[in-house]
Amino acid sequence: MKDQELILRFFALHFGLKAYQRPMKNFLNMFMLWNRNLDKIPAKGLEEIFKKTTQLIIEGLGEKPFRLVNQINAAFAEAVMVGIAYNLNQNIALVPENLKSKYDILLKDEQFIKACSSNTSDENTVRKRIDISNRILGEAP
């Protein structure tokens, strides 16, 4: 179920970051309720942004990204995925060839790592890590 939660977190934060309030579980439940009938964001739209984002991740970072230690860090994964999707929507030239270098910059950003490691569901922390990801992934190579 962890994989399903990560996918839901990606969608909810990509489409509803401004409405985010902790706890994360309630936010995710409210997002699912809001789009329960797929009338706000149709399945095709969800599928399209997910496929574009994950394809870029696989091509640029490989098959096992998002590990700060030995396991997947959900806060890190959601921030990178939302940052990628955001920049795809902004028509930024985010391509597999420059994704790895931008990803490495994120890994070295102390504020980003802290926002992925402590108080991860706090409203300001969630917004901070996604803002940093959006900014760094959107910078010119």
Image (tube, grey):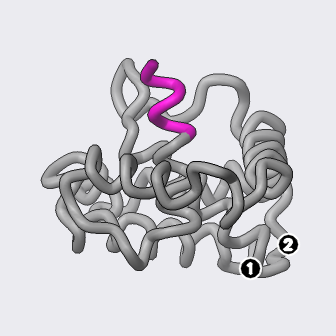
Point out residue 5 in the picture as x, y percentages from the top left corner.
45, 33
Q: Amino acid type of disc 2?
A: Ala
User: Is 49 placed above or below 74 here?
Assistant: below
Q: Which residue is mark 2?
A: 93
Distance from the alpha carbon under mark 1 to that under mark 2: 8 Å
Point out residue 32 in the picture as x, y percentages from the top left corner.
49, 49
Magenta residue span? 1-7
Q: Amino acid type of disc 1?
A: Ala
Mark 1 vs mark 2, foreground winner is 2
Say which element carries label 2: loop
Residue 97 at least partly seen:
no
Check if mark 1's residue and mark 2's residue have beta carbons within 8 Å: yes
Say which element carries label 1: loop
Residue 101 lies in what quarter of the image?
bottom right
**Where, quadrant-wise, is the N terminus in this rendering?**
top left
Q: Residue at x 67, y 66 (%)?
A: 40
**Where, quadrant-wise, is the C terminus in this rendering?**
bottom right
Point out residue 88 in the picture as x, y percentages from the top left corner.
78, 68
Look at the image and say whether residue 126 sits in the magenta stretch: no
Q: Residue at x 68, y 49 (%)?
A: 100
* Numbered mark located on residue 140 in the image: 1
Upstream in the sequence, badge 1 or badge 2? 2
Q: Residue at x 15, y 50 (%)?
A: 118
